[in-house]
Image (cartoon, grey):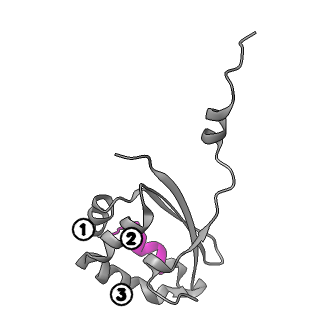
Amino acid sequence: MSELRRYCMHAQVDPARLDEYRRRHAAVWPEMLEALAESGWHNYSLFLRPDGLLIAYVESEDLAAAQAAMAATEVNARWQAEMSDFFVGLDSTPDVGFQPIEEVFNLETQLAAVPARKEN
């Protein structure tokens, strides 16, 4: 496997539907979970603020390829159809409508670049 890259994105969930959004994600369909894993989604997490700001974090060799692989699955079409109504301000389905967020710091990356320190 090639090196995994980190991706972070955001979207806005309708604040009136937060409880239902949480319920849906507490028990994602097993076939959806399997499709995500098989399509190259790793360490995928969603974080939700009380005002509906949703932050998605995922690691993948190639996010565009992982998204395309998911788009080719029947289970993703069903899931996106059910989830679309939860979001505000998206021009497409949630799986591709998330807005990317630039990574500006990663502890492990910077630690790996620090020359070895001498122990006293």
Give the position of the N terminus as an image quadrant: top left
Secondary structure beneath disc 3? helix
First to last magenta residue range = 20-28
Point 30% across, 82% down: residue: 77
- The residue that mark 3 highlights is 81
Q: In which quarter of the image is residue 95?
A: bottom left
Point 65% across, 34% down: residue: 113
Dot 2 alpha-carbon crowd within 10 angstroms: few under 14, some 14 to 19, many 20 or more: some
- Is 87 positioned to the left or the right of 65 in the image? right
User: Horizontal and vertical percent for residue 111?
Assistant: 65, 34
* Secondary structure, magenta segment, majority class: helix
In the rendered structure, which amino acid carries the disc numbered 1? Glu
- The residue that mark 1 highlights is 31
* Residue positioned most to the top: 120
- Is 98 positioned to the left or the right of 107 in the image? left
Say which mark, if any, is on residue 91. Answer: none
Tags 2 and 1 touching, CB below 8 Å:
no
Of the numbered discs 2 and 1, the one sitting upstream in the chain is 1
User: Horizontal and vertical percent for residue 99?
Assistant: 58, 75
Dot 1 alpha-carbon crowd within 10 angstroms: few under 14, some 14 to 19, many 20 or more: few
User: Horizontal and vertical percent for residue 72?
Assistant: 27, 76
* Image position of 35 with respect to 104: above or below: below
- The residue that mark 2 highlights is 67
Residue 13 sits inside the magenta stretch: no
